[in-house]
Image: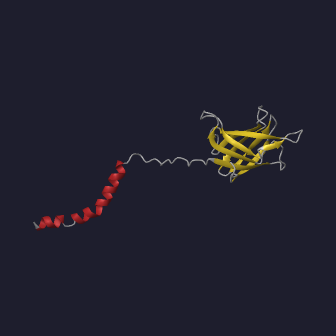
Amino acid sequence: MLRLIRLLGPAPIVARTLAPVLVASSLVAQQPHRTPIRRPAPPKPALQCFAIWPDTGSRPRFLPESLILGANWVGRSRTGFRAAAVSPDRIPRTGGEREDTLGASWSAYGPLYAADSIYVAWWVISAGGPPMGELRAEVNGDSLSGRAVEGSGPGLRIHGRSTSCPPDH
């Protein structure tokens, strides 16, 4: 009997020492292949506002000072354009004392780069014709860069930065 006690003597100590290691390794073995946890991107705010300026330094008449990009879709379709505004949203008519009001919309187009690629168009609402100006740009965090075009012109290199949105939008 003493022989049996001597043989079992260190066994409980070994069992107590190895138990946590054995339990942990068996749990790891039961888990499926480890893949990184993918968390969805945080939702974009209802409004994103950007101050924009041209590389040339002087601002042409067609180029607004800021863009206000909304999250709401224009129309019934969930594909296509979202609501937008430009500021200033009124421009003087070329030959008179009256002003024209500008409308705008925007869309995201394809994951071309790590940045979000956007297209913004703005137009004179009363004219009902083609856009007065267009901007294709990449948004990287709080900065924006791209090209703005008036009609079918060559376009201007544009830069921008995120700003706080005006309270009336």
In the displayed orientation, state which residue is furthest to the right. Answer: 95
Q: Residue visible at 17% across and 64% down?
A: 7
For residue 4, side relative to residue 33 (left or right): left
In the displayed orientation, state which residue is furthest to the top. Answer: 129
In the image, residue 70 lies at what x, y percent? Answer: 65, 44
In the image, residue 30 lies at what x, y percent? Answer: 34, 48
Residue 120: tell me if it is visible: no
Please state, as top left, top right, bottom left or bottom right, where the N terminus lies in the image: bottom left
29, 43: nearer the viewer: 43
118 shown above or below 161: above
Number of marks: 0
Q: Residue visible at 85% across and 40% down?
A: 93
The image quadrant that residue 74 belongs to is top right
131, 72: nearer the viewer: 72
In the image, residue 71 lies at what x, y percent? Answer: 62, 43
In the displayed orientation, state which residue is furthest to the front. Answer: 98
For residue 120, side relative to residue 32 (left or right): right
The image quadrant that residue 25 belongs to is bottom left
167, 12: nearer the viewer: 167
In the image, residue 94 lies at what x, y percent? Answer: 88, 39
Q: Residue visible at 78% across and 40% down?
A: 101
Residue 92: tell me if it is visible: yes
Looking at the picture, the colour scheme in use is secondary structure
58 shown above or below 74: below
